[in-house]
Image (cartoon, rainbow, N blue to C red):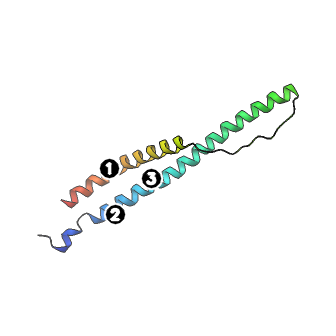
Amino acid sequence: SDGIRGIYNGYGISLAGSVVYRLIYLGGYDVMKNELKFWKEQQKQQQEQEQQAQMDQSSSKQTAINTAVYMTWTERFLLAQFVSLLAGTICYPIDSVRRRMMM
């Protein structure tokens, strides 16, 4: 009964919901990934400082330590699941409005 115009009922809110979801998902993953790496780097530096203090006390030969920090596959997977759940939860009200507008 709405004709061609009826096909596009709810299109605007659907587009807005998709954009918000993607922004939260991709932006959230990037931010959380950087925060996790930063936290791991701090932990590694703290451990290195403790090891250095122990070496200084024992007067042993100092060696270079690799400071590269990597995320394991499990950490990346769990982080992606958490961010996906967060984005879905935040965007659920928008999805509900979209469904009502399309009816």
Q: Badge 3: few (under 14), some or many (20 or more) residues near its Cα, within 10 Å? A: many
Give the side of residue 100 with respect to residue 76, left or right.
Answer: left
Give the side of residue 49 with respect to residue 1, left or right.
Answer: right
Distance in Å between CA atoms under marks 3 and 1 = 13 Å
Give the side of residue 56 with respect to residue 98, left or right.
Answer: right
Quadrant hosting residue 41? top right
Q: Secondary structure at mark 3?
A: helix
| Residue bearing the label numbered 3 | 25
Q: Quadrant of the N terminus?
A: bottom left
Q: Amino acid at mark 1?
A: Tyr
| Residue bearing the label numbered 1 | 92
* Residue 87 x, y percent position in the rendering: 40, 49
| Residue bearing the label numbered 2 | 15
Q: Amino acid at mark 3?
A: Tyr
Q: Badge 1: few (under 14), some or many (20 or more) residues near its Cα, within 10 Å? A: few
* Residue 102 x, y percent position in the rendering: 21, 61
Q: Amino acid at mark 2?
A: Leu
Q: Secondary structure at mark 1?
A: helix
Earlier sequence position, callout 2 versus callout 3: 2
Q: Residue at x 45, y 47 (%)?
A: 83
* Residue 76 x, y percent position in the rendering: 52, 45
Front: mark 3 or 1: 3
Distance in Å between CA atoms under marks 2 and 1 = 14 Å
